[in-house]
Amino acid sequence: MTDRAKTPWHLWVIGLVSLLWHAGGAYDYTMTQTRNEAYLRTAAENAGVSYEAMIGYYTTFPAWADALWAFGVWGAAAGSILLLLRSKFAFYAFILSLIGLAGTTVYTFYSDIPAELNSSFTWIFTAVIWIVTLLLALYAKRMTAAGILR
């Protein structure tokens, strides 16, 4: 019989906040992939860019970049859910997300991104995503080492 470590309160807070954060990314990914015009027009307007530039850029992603984007988004969402389920596989889901994020970051850096999308906001937001995902992977690793995630 194994002793299961008591779940600390911060796991629930971090897990729920992480799930909400990544649900937003999953929603954005889904709306972009399905070419939801109303969503994309609103997103373009909120970002201060033209709808044509936004849709033109995102519809020209090669399949490998779309696949890496999917790994990034869905890996992070799965990691959040796995944190809440107290599964050690949360760490691996966040690692998958980081691999996807690395690929999409490289693609964005080297692609022919329209000038209006190549803003400081784009790169700051990308940095925030990197920081959040790295911290979540480290947190999951720490919780696994502490016997909280199994």
Image (cartoon, helix red, strand yellow):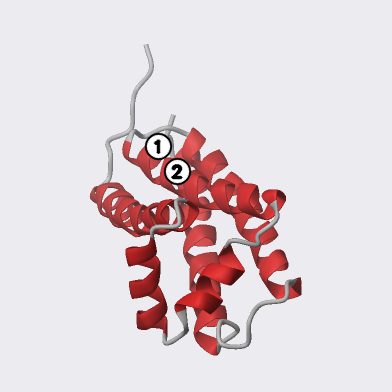
Q: Which of 140 and 75 is in front in this view?
A: 75
- Tally of numbered tags: 2
Q: Nearer the viewer, residue 58 or 89?
A: 58
Question: Mark 1 is on which residue type?
Answer: Leu
Give the alpha-carbon distance from disc 2 to disc 1, as whole Å: 5 Å
- SS under mark 1: helix
Task: Give the numbered dot on residue 79.
Answer: 2
Question: Mark 2 is on which residue type?
Answer: Gly
The structure residue drawn at horizontal position 27% and vertical position 51%, both measured from the top left corner, is 16
Q: Are marks 2 and 1 in contact (CB under 8 Å)?
A: yes
Residue 34 place in picture, x, y as percent: 45, 51
Question: Mark 1 highlights which residue?
Answer: 82
Whether 78 is drawn above or below 19: the answer is: above
The structure residue drawn at horizontal position 46% and vertical position 58%, both measured from the top left corner, is 32
Q: Nearer the viewer, residue 142 or 54?
A: 54
Whether 114 is drawn above or below 84: the answer is: below
